[in-house]
Image (cartoon, rainbow, N blue to C red):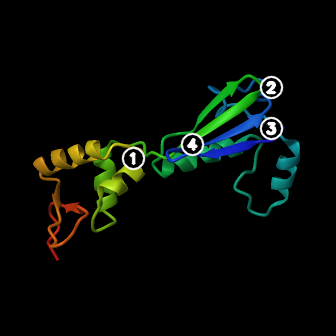
């Protein structure tokens, strides 16, 4: 038995054989300390300036990094004799917030980019979000002759 990783458009799943160790459960995993693989722990302890210093700290590091990056926290579940971890490719923000945050660092955004960032699959839903944001005066559509893709910018951005 080996660990399997499956990559989907909106998530990555890791399926690892074996149950969680000791008293660790999916609900208390961030609070309890116990290692599933002592060989990995010994190896990591030999690495200078390792990001993980203590037993069971790796999962806390993963949760922290996902949160700092604005992503939905990982989902951990035990199914039979497996532990399944799911990392969703979606930000833990409302779509409007995702759009405004992106526009604070980039000149424009497209429907496809919003779908990539939020995990929304329907382009019509994103178009509806754009329309509501335009009505609120938050964004405007960039008007360029001959352009097939709609680009959206902050409403207060001057046209080039």
The quadrant of the picture occupied by the N terminus is top right
Q: Choose top left, top right, bottom left or bottom right for residue 157.
A: bottom left
Name which of mark 1 and mark 3 comes first in the sequence.
3
Q: Are marks 1 and 3 in contact (CB under 8 Å)?
A: no
At mark 2, the secondary structure is loop
Report, in whole angstroms, how far the alpha carbon at label 4 lies from the one at label 3: 21 Å
The residue beneath circle 4 is 87
How many residues crowd mark 2 within 10 Å: few (<14), some (14–19), many (20+)? few
Whole-percent x, y for residue 62 in the image: 62, 46
Question: How far apart are the two marked residues, 1 and 4, measured between alpha carbons?
Answer: 13 Å
How far apart are labels 1 and 3 at the CA level? 33 Å
The Cα atoms of the two marked residues, 4 and 2, are separated by 24 Å
Q: Viewer-nearest of labels 1 and 3?
A: 1
For the residues bearing labels 1 and 4, Cβ distance under 8 angstroms: no
Q: Secondary structure at mark 4?
A: strand
- Residue at label 3? 35
Write the residue at 35% across / 55% down.
112
In contact (CB < 8 Å): disc 2 and disc 1: no
Q: Earlier in the sequence, mark 4 or mark 2?
A: 2
The image position of residue 24, as x and y in percent, is: 73, 27
Q: Which residue is mark 2?
A: 22
Residue 2: percent from the left, percent from the top?
Answer: 81, 41
The residue tagged 1 is 118
Looking at marks 1 and 4 on the same chain, the residue that comes earlier in the sequence is marked by 4
Nearer-the-camera pick, 7 or 24: 7
- Front residue of 160/21: it is 160
The mark nearer the N terminus, 2 or 3, is: 2
The local crowd at label 4, few if under 14, some if 14 to 19, many if 20 or more residues have their Cα within 10 Å, is many
Q: Is residue 132 left or right of residue 37?
A: left
């Amino acid at each position: 038995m080996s660990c399997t990783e499956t990559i989907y458009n909106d998530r990555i799943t890791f399926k690892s054989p074996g149950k969680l160790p000791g008293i660790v459960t999916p609900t208390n995993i961030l609070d309890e300390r116990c290692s599933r693989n002592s060989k990995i722990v010994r190896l990591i302890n030999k690495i200078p300036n390792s990001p993980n210093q203590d037993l069971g700290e790796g999962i806390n590091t993963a949760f922290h990094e996902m949160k700092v990056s604005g992503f939905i926290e990982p989902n951990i579940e035990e199914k039979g004799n497996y532990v399944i971890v799911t990392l969703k490719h979606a930000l833990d923000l409302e779509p409007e917030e995702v759009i405004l945050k992106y526009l604070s660092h980039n000149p424009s955004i497209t429907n496809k980019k919003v779908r990539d960032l939020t995990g929304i699959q329907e382009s019509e839903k994103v178009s509806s979000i754009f329309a509501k944001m335009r009505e609120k005066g938050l964004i405007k559509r960039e008007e360029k002759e001959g352009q097939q893709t709609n680009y959206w910018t902050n409403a207060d951005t001057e046209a080039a």
